[in-house]
């Protein structure tokens, strides 16, 4: 712990997805064969309160990223947007989007290069309920909930990133969402200095 407080080095894999590629998809081809599907977009904790009044809870769902069941509430306060799929009233899949640089800075996440001023956003926290995995819910949530929302706002590119050890996360965005890996990034801290370097995957 003491050593990591002074020095650490992490390697990330970065992916990009062009939302224009999914505009003409046929929903029937992707809709899972599950009854009682509900899609929701939540931008504020007030909206989450209203959703929960109808029994649709996600802020207290113990997902991989919802540490101490407090992260999702904090993310909404910081300006991140949640895209949810429910089976009945149970959270089945969730995707998060960082919509602008201000929110990116508030979260204090790793400094992936995202051109927010040029129709790009950052994707974070993809998760699917183990009970419903490999049923296409995350893909359906992205293509017919998140992507139409973003495209209406002029957003055409989503960038993702995660540490190399997160094999499941990389599989979700590549195999599930069709994102393409474009770079590896090295994130290093030495005392109080931090360094971030993105290296295109095609570079030797």
Image (cartoon, grey):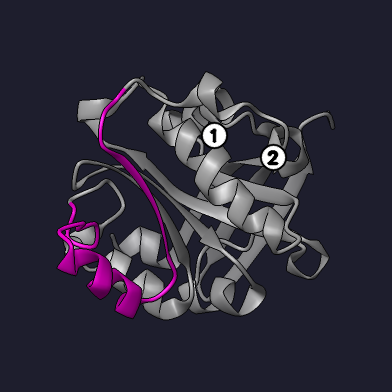
Residue displayed at 39% across by 76% down: 44
Report x, y in % for residue 149. Answer: 59, 56
Report x, y in % for residue 81. Answer: 47, 64
Residue 70 lies in quadrant:
bottom left
116 w.r.t. 84: above or below = below
User: Who is closer to the viewer here, 30 or 72?
Assistant: 30
Residue displayed at 26% across by 57% down: 66
Residue displayed at 46% across by 40% down: 141
Label 1–label 2 contact, CB within 8 A = yes
Number of numbered discs: 2
Report x, y in % for residue 19. Answer: 71, 43
Residue 121 lies in quadrant:
bottom right
Tell me if 181 is positioned left or right of 110 in this view. Answer: right
40 w.r.t. 160: above or below = below
Report x, y in % for residue 24. Answer: 72, 32
Disc 2 marks which residue? 17
Gap between marks 1 and 2 measured at Cα: 9 Å
Mark toward the start of the polypeptide (1 vs 2): 2
Crowding near the residue tagged with mark 1, few <14, some 14–19, many ≥20 C-alpha atoms within 10 Å: many
Location of the N terminus by quadrant is bottom left
Q: Is residue 50 magenta?
A: yes
133 w.r.t. 165: above or below = above
**One can see residue 148 in this view:** yes
User: Who is closer to the viewer here, 14 or 123?
Assistant: 123
Q: Magenta part of the protein: which range?
A: 34-61
């Amino acid at each position: 712990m003491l050593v990591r407080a002074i020095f650490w080095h992490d390697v990330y894999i970065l992916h990009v997805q062009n939302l224009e590629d999914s505009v003409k998809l046929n929903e029937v081809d992707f809709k899972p064969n599950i009854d009682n599907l509900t899609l929701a977009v939540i931008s504020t904790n007030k909206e989450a309160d209203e959703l929960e009044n109808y029994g649709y809870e996600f802020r207290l769902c113990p997902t991989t990223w919802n540490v101490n069941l407090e992260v999702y509430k904090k993310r909404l306060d910081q300006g991140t947007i949640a895209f949810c799929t429910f089976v009945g009233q149970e959270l089945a899949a969730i995707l998060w989007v960082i919509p602008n640089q201000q929110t990116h800075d508030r979260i204090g996440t790793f400094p992936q290069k995202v051109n927010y001023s040029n129709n790009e956003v950052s994707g974070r926290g993809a998760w699917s309920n183990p009970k419903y995995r490999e049923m296409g819910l995350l893909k359906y949530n992205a293509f017919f909930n998140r992507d139409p929302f973003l495209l209406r706002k002029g957003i055409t590119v989503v960038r993702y990133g995660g540490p190399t050890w997160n094999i499941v996360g990389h599989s979700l965005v590549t195999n599930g969402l069709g994102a393409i890996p474009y770079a590896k990034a090295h994130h290093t801290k030495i005392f109080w200095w931090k360094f971030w370097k993105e290296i295109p995957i095609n570079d030797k």
